[in-house]
């Protein structure tokens, strides 16, 4: 299980070049480079984030979410250019649009309350009125898409049991709903056939073993499609347009997940896309002409487009020094919309005729006060860890580090969420803000991270705060070997599971980092695992293989920083959302109180209207300014790190 959220600026928890250190061609200080202005966090947050997309029925608009006002709302972007048109005006809760209706410009969107993750699905009518399609308290809804004939759409909710998600079919006219599948097994549905005959479900045995089941909605029969012995991941992604084949990924006999086509009638299987990296997603265009495949290529997105019938590649637009992050095909299969990003810069939305003309850029996200080359792109850098294992990560180096005669700089080891997450070289305001203010940031993908093969991903199973933390410590040597990092001024920072790693560093290896910055990290695994939200509690087997037996009190105490808090001797900062359902505020309350009893400097900030992550611009501004102030005080201060006591 992963404690994860949107990939906007975002986060996660359980969301289950060697420098001889180091091999990176431009890591050594060189001659003078141009001066870059030092910006406030306002400029870094004065970008307009755009995400999601859905073409209007006539392809004249693209439905997106954006935080232009400081809170995410729904907007329509004219394909021919022009200013975004606001469709919702929420001042408090984030609005995440899901899809236009097939024949008109009504649209569906999701929203929760203050970050509590109790997501409801709403329909926004043509006259601007809104209807909640998932009425009730304490429930969570999931949008599953329109059916193949466009006469209805599907939503699943856990309203009946809290743990299991039943599927309802809603008519596009009047929104009358009927139950089409009652979940009595707890297997998540990951694909639905266009003819609404079959459901593909994934049974999560543990974090290395998943099976696919096929449920026939007409016959009311469940069939195991992937009987196997041993640790093999199978995960269903999409049915073909004619509903005769199921496409799924598997790592059978492979380190990486590849795409397979399974014929439902004969049971015959054929690999269709098998790269040297993980296939992450695959989906068909509305009428089945195209197949979109996304590959995780060394922490970067590699997007491929195929003619589905022949599996011949379709050329995608080429944008210099950019990668396509995500791609959507219009219902009539004539146009594509895609987000693309240059290293370090926010993603931008483009549209293009598949015929194929020049891509047209619809968004300009960066603050007009900043230049693109003021930002710093992330460079993939690998190093040898304490035991010789090669560890990858993304290195962000301030421009001034390369100036001749420049003083050595402080650094932060950035730890991603998860466990099992992965850092990517994407725009993240806090990282760019820290780098702009003179910090080297290394976003480590320690052992146990996804994207580097199944062997690597399981190296931290039941060893959290152990070898993966030792990777973080070992990365310090790589940073020092660059020649521009001060070995006495290296801190550690992380969110969610990364926040846990910060607390683990300060308790299990307390002399290694000069300071720690924890954003909503787990301090007590006993409490966190006991209080999982019901929709995550069904993943117990997976979590137990990853973290350890929920009933093994002594082991969970051994990896929980709260029970070793007396070891903390370095300054600690903790940030927490009061409504966080994954890492309860009590986790942060307890670690702060206990660390303060040690007599070390501890700063604590709670955001009353946030959950597992900080999304409101005013809260991010406050949080990121506070983080920089804390880092400046304990990593840049003339006295250096606080002496050990």
Image (cartoon, grey):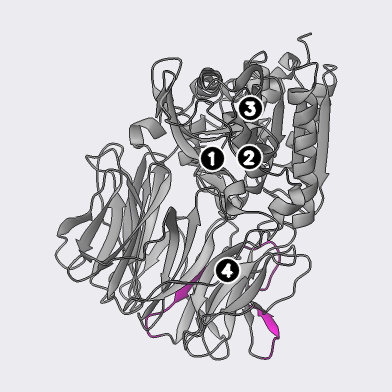
* Left or right of 189 in this view: 623: right
Name the residue at 46% across, 31% down: 26
Q: Kindly indicate the quadrant of the structure image that contains residue 291.
A: bottom left
Q: Which residue is mark 1?
A: 418
User: Residue 496 has which mark?
Assistant: 2
Mark linked to residue 363: 4
Looking at the rendering, which quadrant does residue 571 occupy? top right
Q: Residue furthest front?
A: 32
Residue 460 is tagged as: none
Q: Secondary structure at mark 2?
A: loop
Residue segment shown in magenta: 127-149
Residue 348, horizontal then vertical, whole percent? 53, 63
Q: Nearer the N terminus, badge 2 or badge 1?
A: 1
The residue beneath circle 3 is 411
Of discs 3 and 2, which sits in the foreground?
Answer: 3
Vertical comparison of 326 with 179: above or below = above
Name the magenta segment's main secondary structure. loop
Residue for point 51% across, 29% down:
548
Residue pictured at 42% horizontal, 66% vertical: 327
Specify few, some or many for label 4: CA neighbours under 10 Å numbering under 14, 14-19, or 20 or more: some
Instruction: Assess whether mark 3 and mark 1 are in contact (beta carbons under 8 angstroms).
Output: no
C-beta proximity under 8 Å, tags 2 and 4? no
305 and 93: which one is in front?
A: 305
């Amino acid at each position: 299980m992963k404690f994860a959220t949107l990939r906007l600026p975002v986060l996660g928890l359980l969301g289950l070049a060697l420098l001889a250190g180091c091999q990176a061609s431009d890591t050594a200080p060189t001659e003078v480079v141009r001066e870059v202005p030092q910006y406030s966090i306002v400029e870094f947050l004065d970008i307009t984030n755009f995400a999601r997309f859905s073409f209007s029925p006539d392809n004249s608009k693209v439905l997106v979410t954006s935080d232009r006002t400081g809170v995410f709302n729904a907007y329509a972007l004219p394909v021919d250019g022009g200013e975004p048109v606001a469709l919702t005006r929420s001042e408090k809760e984030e609005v995440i649009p899901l899809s236009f209706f097939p024949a008109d410009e009504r649209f569906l969107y999701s929203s929760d309350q203050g970050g509590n993750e109790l997501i409801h699905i709403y329909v926004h009518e043509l006259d601007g009125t809104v209807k909640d399609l998932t009425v009730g308290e304490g429930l969570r809804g999931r949008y599953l898409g329109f059916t193949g004939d466009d006469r209805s759409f599907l939503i699943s909710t856990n309203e009946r049991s809290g743990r299991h998600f039943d599927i309802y079919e809603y008519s596009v006219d009047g929104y009358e709903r009927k139950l089409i599948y009652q979940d009595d097994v707890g297997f998540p549905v990951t694909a639905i056939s266009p003819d609404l005959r079959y459901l593909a479900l994934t049974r999560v045995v543990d974090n290395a073993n998943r099976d696919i089941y096929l449920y026939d909605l007409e016959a009311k029969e469940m069939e195991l499609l992937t009987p196997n012995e041993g640790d093999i991941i199978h995960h269903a992604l999409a049915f073909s347009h004619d509903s005769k084949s199921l496409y799924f990924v598997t790592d059978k006999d492979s380190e990486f997940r590849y795409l397979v086509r399974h014929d439902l009638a004969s049971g015959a299987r054929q690999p269709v896309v098998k790269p040297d990296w993980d296939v992450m997603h695959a989906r068909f265009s509305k009428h089945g002409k195209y197949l979109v495949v996304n590959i995780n290529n060394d922490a970067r997105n590699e997007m491929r487009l195929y003619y589905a019938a022949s599996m011949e590649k379709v050329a995608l637009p080429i944008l210099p020094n950019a990668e396509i992050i995500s791609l959507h095909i219009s219902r009539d299969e004539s146009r594509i919309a895609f987000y693309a990003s240059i290293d370090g810069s926010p993603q931008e939305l483009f549209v293009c005729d598949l015929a194929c003309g020049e891509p047209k850029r619809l968004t300009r996200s960066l603050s007009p006060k900043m230049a693109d080359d003021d930002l710093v792109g992330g460079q993939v850098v690998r190093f040898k860890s304490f035991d010789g294992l090669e560890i990858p990560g993304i290195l962000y180096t301030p421009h001034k580090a390369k100036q001749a005669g420049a003083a050595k700089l402080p650094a932060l080891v950035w730890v991603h969420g998860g466990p099992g997450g992965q850092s990517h070289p994407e725009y993240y305001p806090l990282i760019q803000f820290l780098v702009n203010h003179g910090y080297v940031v290394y976003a480590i993908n320690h052992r146990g991270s996804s994207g580097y093969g199944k062997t690597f991903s399981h190296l931290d199973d039941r060893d959290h705060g152990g070898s993966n933390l030792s990777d973080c410590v070992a990365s310090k040597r790589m940073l020092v070997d660059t020649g521009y990092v001060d070995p006495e001024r290296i801190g550690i920072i992380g969110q969610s599971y990364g926040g846990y790693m910060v607390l683990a560093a300060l308790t299990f290896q307390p002399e290694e980092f000069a300071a720690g910055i924890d954003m909503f990290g787990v301090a007590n695994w006993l409490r966190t695992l006991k209080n999982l939200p019901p929709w995550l509690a069904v993943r117990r087997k997976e979590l137990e293989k990853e973290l350890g037996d929920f009933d093994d009190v002594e082991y969970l105490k051994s990896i929980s920083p709260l029970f070793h808090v007396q070891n903390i001797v370095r300054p600690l900062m903790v940030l927490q959302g009061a409504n966080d359902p994954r890492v309860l505020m009590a986790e942060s309350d307890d670690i702060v109180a206990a660390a303060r009893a040690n007599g070390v400097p501890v700063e604590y900030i709670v955001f009353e209207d946030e959950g597992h992550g900080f999304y409101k611009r005013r809260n991010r501004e406050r949080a990121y300014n506070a983080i920089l102030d804390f880092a400046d005080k304990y990593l840049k201060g003339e006295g250096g790190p606080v002496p050990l006591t």
